[in-house]
Image (spheres, rainbow, N blue to C red):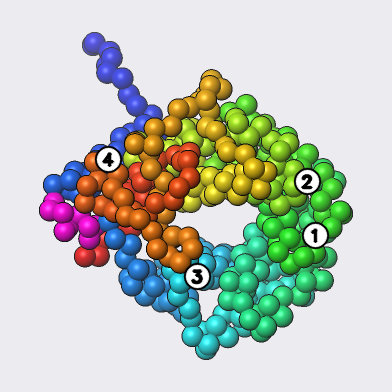
Amino acid sequence: MEPDREPRGTVTQREQSMVLNDVNMLYHIYASVPPLAQKLMMELQRKNHVEYLLRGLQQLGPSFCSLDANRPWICYWILHSMALLGEFIDADLEDRTIEFLSRCQDPNGGYGGGPGQMPHLATTYAAVNALISLGGEKSLSSINRSKVYTFLKCMKDPSGAFRMHDAGEIDVRACYTAISVASILNILDDELLQNVGNYILSCQTYEGGIAGEPGSEAHGGYTFCGLAAMILINEADRLDLDALIGWVVFRQGVEGGFQGRTNKLVDGCYSFWQGGVFALLRRFHSIIGESPTPVDQRGAECSIDNTQTTTASDVSEGDGSSDEISSQGDEHCHFQHREREPLFHSIALQRYLLLCSQVQIL
């Protein structure tokens, strides 16, 4: 019998092909409809998002049971999204949220994933940021800063890094959440800072990105966490930033979104983490007065054609006014423009998020 010589793709390749087909179909539909329909498809469904978020803050369906140990995260994701949308929650819901997060606070410091659960750096980060997103004396005074500091010191490892929880894993995520919480609560000191930068530096890979731990693969989430932590401790210049920029630039896929690792699928989650890296880089370079330059995988500088790639943002600066622009091939789609040199195709990213990630309710 003649052996089957037809090449067989890997599971990842087959899934990638399915994603590309789905994205291609959505883009084909977008290109085939009238201009008015295109405009509707490219709108951020603000009202629907707000209604969804408010429902989620009060009650979640059975499918969310698997996230029982992540309840402070759900509070943070919802409250942060509401803040980005310029929306607020009423006083009663705010009080109930503060009361719930207070019950997640461990008597010995830190916050658990729910009332009675053990404290964890990730849920401590989420709870603290959720309470800060709410603001106000009641919300902020509910955070026991001295107990949080005690918890952070207990999570400090002799290597300089942090553990996520008692006897838990050590990684860059733990370093970022610990340093971020300490920084925002103004409890960051030399003891917490000791050798954190050395550990994160040891996690930058030959690819340019940052891995979760030394010897692992560069990863979008850990790259964000590592870079953010290094900026917070004023040691970002120790990283190979040219290599980091080159790696993250090449994580944008043909779909417009970002992948978390080399040869992985793009999605909305990693579009957030990788997109956040660019925001951090812009912030860092604005402080030191330099302009970041993307490099390709061989270390050569990449040319940037501003007729092909245009910076855009749904959030304008200053008084909120902005010039409407049209990108090449998007005659009917207007975006707000920022006069900054782009490091990635921002309009392609917006298109991917609005067409492919947002649930369309027209």
Instruction: Using the numbered discs, state the Cα–Cα distance from disc 1 to disc 3 in whole angstroms.
Output: 26 Å
The residue where tag 4 is placed is: 328
The residue where tag 3 is placed is: 83
The residue where tag 1 is placed is: 188
Q: Earlier in the sequence, mark 1 or mark 3?
A: 3
Measured from the top left, where is residue 61 in percent x and y?
Answer: 41, 72
Q: Which element carries disc 2, helix, strand or loop? A: helix
- Label 4 is placed on what type of residue? Gln
Rate crowding at label 1 as few (under 14), some (14 to 19) or many (20 or more) other CA atoms within 10 Å: some
Rate crowding at label 4 as few (under 14), some (14 to 19) or many (20 or more) other CA atoms within 10 Å: few
The residue where tag 2 is placed is: 196
Q: Which residues are magenta?
A: 33-41
Measured from the top left, where is residue 291 in percent x and y?
Answer: 58, 38
Query: In the rendered view of the protein, which quadrant contains the C terminus?
Result: bottom left
Task: Locate residue 203 relative to residue 11 in the image: left or right.
Answer: right
Who is closer to the viewer here, 319 or 210? 319
Q: Earlier in the sequence, mark 3 or mark 4?
A: 3
Q: Nearer the viewer, mark 4 or mark 1?
A: 4
Query: In the rendered view of the protein, which quadrant contains the N terminus?
Result: top left
Magenta span has 39?
yes
